Image: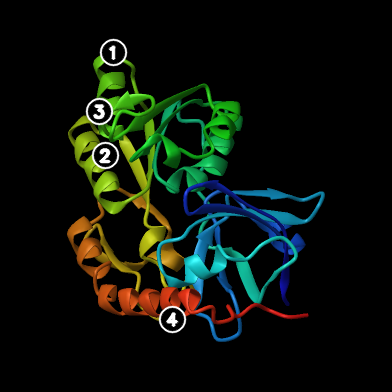
Amino acid sequence: MMNKIVNAEFIAPDIKLFKIKAPYIAEKRKPGQFVVLRVHELGERIPITIADADINDGTITIIVQGIGKTTKHLNKLGAGDYIHDLAGPLGKPSHIDKFGRVVCISGGVGTAEALPIAKALKEAGNEVISIIGARTRDLVITEKEMADRTDEVIITTDDGSYGKKGFVTNALQELLDEGKKVDFILAIGPLPMMKAVSEMTRPLNITTMVSLNSIMIDATGMCGGCRATVGGKTVFVCVDGPEFDGHQVDFSVLENRQKIYIDEERTSLKKFEEDCRLGKEIKKVKI
C-alpha cells in the first residue's frame, strides 16, 4: 500500500517534517515506536521514529534530516507525492510510568523522537524538564511543541547562538548542582551524547534510558546490522528496543558498528548528488 504525503515543509536546514496518510499506523502507534519505509520500489528500507499521529485525519508525522542518499531523496518529495511502502508501528513502546521528576535530553533531530515520549511522561503525572541541544540556533527544532508538552525547556547550542552555550550535559549538570532530584532520564540523539549522559548519571544511580534507533538498518531483526551489547548480552535494537538502559549499553561496540558502511554510504550519496546536478529525474512513486 502506497502512502500519500499530505504535508511537507522544511523546519530547519536539511530537516523536513512530513505528514503522511497512514490511518492504521496512526491508530496503533505508541510513544517510542517507529516506521520503516522505502521511497520507491528499488529504494533501501530506512527506519524513522514516529514524531506524532492524528487519529482523526489518519496521519502520522515524521521528521527527517537529510544526511545520506535515501534521506536526501526523501526530502525532495512534497505534498501530493507518495511513499512506496510504509510499515509500522515497529519496536517496543517506551516504558511510561510515574517516576517523579523526569529529564528528557535530546540532540539534533532526536528532539522529534523525544517529543511524543515527553508528552506521555507528562500525561502520566511526571514533572518533565526538556533539554534540547543543537550545534547552532538554526538546527533547534520543535521547541514550541516541546514547551507545550513539558514543564520547562532548556536550550543549549554548541556555538552559543541560542540558549545556553555548551552541551546538554552542561545543562544537566547545572540542574543537578541546583539540588534538583532527578528520578528518570531519557536521552535521544548522537551516540557520543547518549554515552556522555549515561556516564554522567551512572555514579548517581539515576535511571537513564537511551534510544539506539540511529544504528538500525532493516528494522525487522533479519539483517543483524543493529546488534548491540547490553548488559553483556547481544540484542537486536529494532526488535528488542529501541530503548535500553544506558548504564548497560556498550557504546564502543555501537560506535564501531556505525562506521562499517561509511564508505559505501559516501559513494551512494556522491552519485545521487551528481545525478541531481546533471538534472536526471529523481525517481518518484507514480499512481
Mark 2 residue type: Val
Sooner in the amino-acid sequence: mark 1 or mark 4: 1
- Whether residue 95 is visible: no
* Numbered circles on residues, count: 4
Q: Nearer the viewer, mark 3 or mark 2?
A: 3
The quadrant of the picture occupied by the N terminus is bottom right
Q: Quadrant of the C terminus?
A: bottom right
Q: Amino acid at mark 1?
A: Glu
Whether label 4 touches label 2, CB < 8 Å: no
* Residue drawn at the location 60% of the way across and 85% of the way down: 41
Q: Are marks 1 and 4 in contact (CB under 8 Å)?
A: no
Residue under pointer 4: 222
Q: Residue at x 44, y 72 (%)?
A: 69
Residue 11, position in %: x, y? Answer: 56, 45
- Residue of label 3: 170
Where residue 158 sits, quadrant-wise, is top left
For the point 63% across and 71% down, the residue is: 86
From the image, state whether disc 4 or disc 2 is nearer to you: 2
Q: Secondary structure at mark 3?
A: helix
Q: Earlier in the sequence, mark 3 or mark 1?
A: 3
Q: Secondary structure at mark 1?
A: loop
**Gap in Å between the C-alphas at discs 3 and 4?**
39 Å
Kind of element beneath mark 2 = helix
Judging by the rendered image, the residue that carries numbered circle 1 is 178
Whole-Å distance between the Cαs marked 1 and 2?
Answer: 18 Å
User: Can you see residue 3?
Assistant: yes
- The residue under label 2 is 197
- Residue 242 is situated, as x and y percent measured from the top left of the image, at 43, 58
Vertical position of residue 29 compared to residue 120: above or below: below
